Image (cartoon, grey):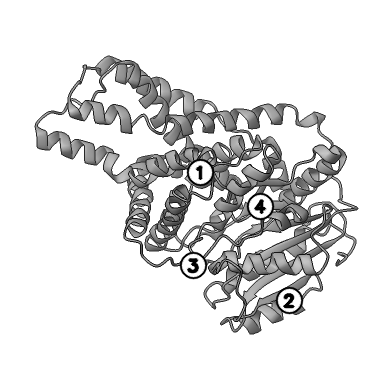
């Protein structure tokens, strides 16, 4: 175990102090959901005309499908507001004196991903030591990777950084490939080194995702709370993935990615926070007790390309009720191009569709994910533009549902979409340098929701096609902005 140098816990800069203060004052908004819901419900009820046609029946089903996920998401936002109201009753963050934190950062080690890796790793050794005297950062690379020399030089800058190299000849028992193979190698290494213990925590991070002072405080607060809880402690937790404006090289994809932090404070907050991460988890800011990870591993087979989600579903089966959520953020970067944005979504959809049909996972842990993924990948077919085109073809522009009560569900679903982009943009602006949205950003992000929906749906549909065609799995790693 590596001991971090003793440091003061005060934020290192004025910006850090402001960031911590902004996070302390934040809570999910209610009005950005309530106002669109009332307007959409009012207009829908006023304009309703019974529509028992095939189009009416089809729309009644497909536009209502997201309802379950929407209700879960709203529950998550309300749970955050409730916890924040009681935050004064929680024990403040203090240094973790007895538990050891290992930050695991897998990287493909290409030259175009190294700048983001360096930014991320330097943030770990800057912000985590004040709260974690026992700390090590493991940079997980492949033998012979392009940027090996740069990564070794990075490790030489700080004694807390260790490079773990996965040998080319390494194979898992089930033939797992890609990132899951590397994670499994690190998991086996921890077991061999005697670190698969209850008081050792593994913080999984992506190579383009850094941390801040709030991250360290939130993770420390969570770890200390589990030590006080004893046998009732949680084994897994996750926070919020946010995108500072300064990390973006493409403002368009940055706006499109507003939906991601909103999902973290909605569905993921509800499910992971209540102990059942059936929607999966992110591969970054994922905190796992090392002894528990040792019982699961990452050897999910050669087709696994969304290993984090499969780990979450396995966790649900083996450790029901033992996950949680914490109000800390990590800081990533949106894809550099629209093409990369779609490719990223394509890989996620490809892997998630396969996971939904993976019979080694009991159906009771897959059905919610199946519902969410189906809504996503068939998005282009239920897009407003597609519906209007079909209505034009059949010569009937009545797009009402078969029953007036369905209008309420539609209003709920569409208002939730508006809320996710509004609140996600607010979160991303909050973690940016000035902490505010620019006056035009909310207008543009709301106006572009139909375009963003096409981008999300296109990636999802392409992933579905690759699954149906049984193409050879590929773990696509996009370029990472510095």
Report the residue marked by disc 2: 155
Quadrant location of the N terminus in the rendered image: bottom right
Which residue is tagged 1? Answer: 425
225 is higher (above) or lower (below) than 136: above
Which of the marked residues, 3 or 4, is nearer the chain's N terminus? 4
Chain-order first, disc 4 or disc 1 = 4
Q: Give me the C-alpha separation between circle 3 and circle 2.
A: 23 Å
User: In the rendered view, would you say 441 is above or below 131?
Assistant: above
The residue to which callout 3 is attached is 477
Element at label 3 = loop
Do the residues under discs 3 and 2 have CB atoms within 8 angstroms?
no
Residue 92 visible within the image = no
Identified at 20% across, 30% down, the residue is 55
Residue 382: x %, y % from top left: 29, 39
Give the distance between the C-alpha atoms of the residues marked 3 and 4, in whole angstroms. Answer: 19 Å
Point out the frontmost of discs 1 and 3: 3
* Mark 4 lies on residue: 286
Dot in front, 1 or 2: 2
């Amino acid at each position: 175990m590596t001991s971090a140098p003793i440091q003061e816990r005060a934020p290192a800069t004025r910006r850090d102090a402001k960031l911590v203060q902004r996070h302390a004052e934040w809570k999910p908004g209610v009005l950005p959901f309530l106002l669109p819901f009332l307007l959409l419900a009012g207009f829908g009820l006023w304009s309703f005309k019974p529509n028992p046609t095939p189009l009416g029946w089809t729309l009644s089903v497909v536009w209502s499908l997201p309802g379950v996920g929407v209700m879960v998401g709203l529950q998550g936002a309300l749970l955050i507001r409730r916890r924040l109201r009681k935050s004064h009753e929680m024990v403040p963050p203090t240094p973790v004196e007895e538990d050891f934190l290992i930050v695991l950062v897998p990287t493909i080690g290409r030259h175009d991903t190294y700048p983001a890796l360096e930014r991320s790793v330097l943030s770990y050794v800057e912000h985590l030591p004040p709260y974690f005297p026992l700390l090590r950062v493991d940079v997980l690379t492949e033998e012979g990777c392009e940027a090996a020399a740069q990564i070794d030089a990075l490790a030489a800058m700080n004694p807390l950084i260790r490079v773990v190299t996965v040998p080319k000849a390494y194979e898992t028992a089930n033939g797992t490939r890609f990132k899951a193979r590397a994670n499994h190698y690190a998991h086996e290494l921890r077991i061999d080194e005697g670190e698969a213990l209850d008081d050792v925590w593994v913080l999984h991070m992506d190579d383009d995702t850094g941390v801040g002072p709030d991250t360290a405080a939130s993770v420390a607060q969570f770890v200390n709370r589990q030590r006080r809880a004893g046998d009732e402690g949680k084994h897994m937790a996750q926070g919020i993935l946010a995108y500072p404006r300064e990390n973006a090289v493409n403002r368009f994809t940055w706006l499109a990615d507003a939906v991601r932090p909103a999902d973290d404070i909605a569905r993921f907050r509800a499910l992971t926070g209540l102990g059942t991460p059936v929607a999966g988890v992110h591969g970054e800011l994922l905190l796992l007790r090392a002894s528990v990870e040792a019982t699961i591993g990452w050897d999910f087979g050669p087709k696994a390309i969304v290993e984090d989600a499969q780990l979450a579903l396995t966790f649900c089966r083996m450790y029901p009720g033992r996950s949680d959520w914490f109000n800390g953020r990590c800081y990533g970067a949106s894809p550099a191009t629209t093409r990369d944005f779609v490719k990223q979504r394509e890989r996620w959809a490809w892997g998630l569709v396969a996971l939904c049909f993976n019979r080694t996972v009991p159906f009771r842990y897959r059905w919610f994910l199946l519902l969410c993924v189906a809504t996503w990948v068939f998005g282009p077919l239920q897009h407003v533009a597609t519906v209007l085109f079909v209505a034009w073809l059949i010569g009937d522009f009545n797009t009402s549902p078969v029953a007036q009560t369905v209008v309420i569900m539609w209003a709920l679903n569409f208002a939730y979409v508006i809320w996710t982009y509004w609140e996600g943009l607010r979160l991303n602006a909050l973690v940016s340098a000035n902490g505010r949205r620019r006056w035009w950003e909310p207008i543009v992000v709301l106006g572009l929701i139909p375009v963003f929906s096409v981008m999300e749906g296109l990636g999802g549909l392409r992933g579905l096609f690759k699954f149906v065609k049984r193409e050879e799995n590929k773990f696509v790693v996009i370029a990472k902005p510095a």
